[in-house]
């Protein structure tokens, strides 16, 4: 069970400064790669619930990923 499991802080940082370059949308193969990697992270949250929050936040932007979210991935 999880009785002996140690707690882990979420790997996502909550406050980051963003620049105009970070708001640039990914296009073509970069957007496809973002979606593929995010989907893989989502799949492994079954075994790694500690990355669930960060993965959920990344999945919110799968329809229009930006450079900022690519850097977080």
Image (tube, rainbow, N blue to C red):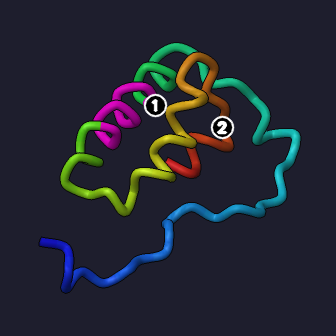
**Which circle marks residue 14 in the picture?**
none
Q: 7 or 69: nearer the eye?
A: 7
Q: Which residue is mark 2?
A: 67
Q: Is residue 40 magenta?
A: yes
Q: Position of residue 9 (x, y in %)?
A: 49, 75
Relative to residue 9, is residue 43 drawn left or right?
left
Which residue sits at x=43%, y=25%? 35
Q: 29 or 4: nearer the eye?
A: 4
Q: Position of residue 51 (x, y in %)?
A: 39, 57
- Is the magenta region chiefly helix, strand or loop? helix
Instruction: Residue lying at the far left in this picture: please name it.
Output: 1
Instruction: Decide: is 57 above or below 6.
Output: above
Q: Which image quadrant for residue 1?
A: bottom left
Instruction: Decide: is 8 above or below 57.
Output: below
Q: Is residue 66 magenta?
A: no
Mark earlier in primary sequence (2, 1):
1
Which residue sits at x=45%, y=45%? 55
Residues under labels 2 and 1: Cα distance? 10 Å
Q: Which residue is mark 1?
A: 34
Which residue sits at x=41%, y=51%? 52
Q: Range of the magenta residues?
A: 34-42
Which residue sits at x=34%, y=31%? 39
Task: Count up the numbered dots.
Answer: 2
Q: Position of residue 33 (x, y in %)?
A: 40, 27
Q: Secondary structure at mark 1?
A: helix
Mark 2 vs 1: CB contact within 8 A: no
Q: 1 or 19: nearer the eye?
A: 1
């Amino acid at each position: 069970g999880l009785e002996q499991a140690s707690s882990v802080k979420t790997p996502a940082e909550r406050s980051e400064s963003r620049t105009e370059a970070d708001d640039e949308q990914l296009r073509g193969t970069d957007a496809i790669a973002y979606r593929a990697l995010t989907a893989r992270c989502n799949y492994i949250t079954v075994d790694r619930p500690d990355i669930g929050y960060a993965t959920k936040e990344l999945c919110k932007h799968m329809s229009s990923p930006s450079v900022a979210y690519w850097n977080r991935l």
